[in-house]
Amino acid sequence: MNIATHLHSSQPIGLHRHAAHFCLLPFAKDVDSSVMQALMRGELPMLDDLPASWRFFHHAANNRPDKAIGLLVGDDPIVSLNRMVLTGESTPLAAESVLHQALAFSLGLSDQTPSRQTPSPERLSDALPVELSAWIGSVAATAQMIQGHMEDACQGLLSAAESCHVASPVLAALLHAQIASLVPNPVHQMQQMQAAIRLASDAAPRIVAELHLALGAIYQARGGTAIVEAIRTYQTALQTDIDEQADVALMAELQNNLATCFLATDDGNHLRAGIAVQTLRHARALICDEQHNELWARITTNLAGALVYAPSSHPQSNLTEAVELYEELLQIRVRDKDPVAYARTSLNQANALAHLGMFGPAMEKAAEAHKLLRAHEEVAAAEAAAELIETIHQARADANRQADANHQADPNQRAHLAQPSAAPEAVHGSA
C-alpha cells in the first residue's frame, strides 16, 4: 500500500487545534496557493475556500468531529486514518505503515512506536512529505522521552526539527519549543525558544503568542534582571493579533504571567501594582467555564496575593476582597480531594484575616492548615504556617495590651485590634 499517492504534497500536521492537529489532507487538484500557505502557517481558511475533500479539516479544527466525520467519503487509507483520528477508534489497515503507527501511538490507541530514527523520504517506502516524516520522527522521540531516554529524545526532536526547517518552518518551530521544555539548562532552553520564534515569524498569531509565552516563562523562572525580558516578551505576545474568544486560555495565561512579573519588580510603585491587579482581574474575568478551572484558580490565587501585599490607598477593602477570593477558591480546592491545595489556600486566607486583625478565624484556619501540611510532609509550607500562628499569637497579645491601655486612659473607649505588622509571605501552591 503506497499511502503517499493518496496524500497532498504538503501537510499541516501538528499545526492546528483539536483533532485537526493529527488530520491528513488527501490529494486535491488546483489548490489555491494562498489556502495552502495559510494552512502551513497554522491559520484556518474559510470553509468555502477549501477544496470539498478538505472541508472536514475545517470542522475538525473547530472541534466539530461529528460534522467532520460526515464529510469523510470512501475507504482509502487517508480517509481511514482520518476517521481513526476523529472517532478515537483504532482502524485496521490493509498493510501497516509507519504513519499509521505514529498516529495510533499519538492517539493512545497503540503502544507500538514508529522507527526511533527520523524517517526521510528516501528511506520510507511510502515516500511521505518531508514534514510528515519529521512529525513521525518527533513521535518516536516522544516515545523515547516517555521511556526516560531524555537525551535520545532531545536529539530525535532536534533531527526532526532540522529536517523540516524549509518544508514546514512552523512545525520545526514547535519541535524546537518542545526541546526547550525538556532540556534542563536555561541557556539551552532560551536558544531553542529563540530558534523557534525565528522560524515561526510568519506563523498564525496564536502560535507566535504561545512561543513567546514559553520564552517569557523561561525568563521569569530565572528571576532577577531577567524579569524585565519576561515582561517585554509577554507584551510582544499580547501585541499579536490573538483571537480573545478562541484563545481565551492563552490570553488569560499571558496576562497572569505579565501581572506576576510586575508584582515581582515591586518597589512600592502604586501605579505598577495597580496595573498588575487590574491585569489579573481581566485575566480572571476571561475564564468562565469549568474547562479552565485550574487556570482560574491560579489566577485567583495571584490576584488575592496581590491584594494582600501590593501597596494601596485602601488596604482594608483589598484585604476583605482577598479573604472573599480565597473563600471562592476553597469551593474548588476541597479538603477531601486535594488536602494540600486546600491547606495552602486556607493558610493564605488565614494570613489575609490576620492582616485584617481577625485573629480568631485566622488562628483557626492557620492551625488546620499547619496540621494538614505536616501530615502530608509539606515541610516549608508547614513551617510558614507555624510562623503565622506565632505571629498571630504575638499580634493578639499586643492588641490586648493596647486595648487595656486604651481602657485605662478612657474606660468608655472601645478597643481596636491592631494588625500584625509583618505577617509571613503567603504560600502560593500550584493550582
Image (cartoon, rainbow, N blue to C red):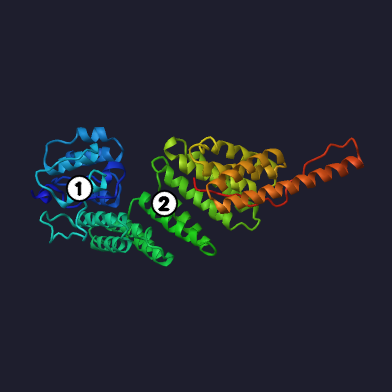
Q: Nearer the viewer, residue 127 or 421?
A: 421
The disc label shown at residue 206, or none: none
Q: Residue at x 34, y 57 (%)?
A: 178
Residue at the disc numbered 2: 240
Q: Residues within 10 Å of mark 2 (few under 14, many from 20)?
A: some
Using the rendered image of the protein, determine whether residue 203 is visible from the camera's viewpoint.
yes
Q: Residues within 10 Å of mark 1 (few under 14, many from 20)?
A: few
Q: Residue at x 69, y 44 (%)?
A: 354
Secondary structure beneath dot 2 equals loop
Q: Nearer the viewer, residue 379 or 16?
A: 379
Using the rendered image of the protein, determine whether residue 48 is visible from the camera's viewpoint.
no
Circle 1 or circle 2, nearest the eye: 2
Residue 58's place in the image compared with 181, above or below, is: above
Percent coordinates x, y for residue 267 in the rendering: 64, 58
- How many marks the image carries: the answer is 2
Which label's residue is closer to the chain start, 1 or 2?
A: 1
Left or right? Give the position of 28 relative to 408. Answer: left
Q: CA distance from mark 1 to mark 2?
A: 26 Å
Residue at the disc numbered 1: 32
Percent coordinates x, y for residue 310 in the rendering: 63, 50
Percent coordinates x, y for residue 138 in the rendering: 26, 56
Q: Residue at x 19, y 34 (%)?
A: 71
Amino acid residing under circle 2: Thr
Q: In which quarter of the view is residue 162 placed?
A: bottom left
- Residue sitting at the far front: 375
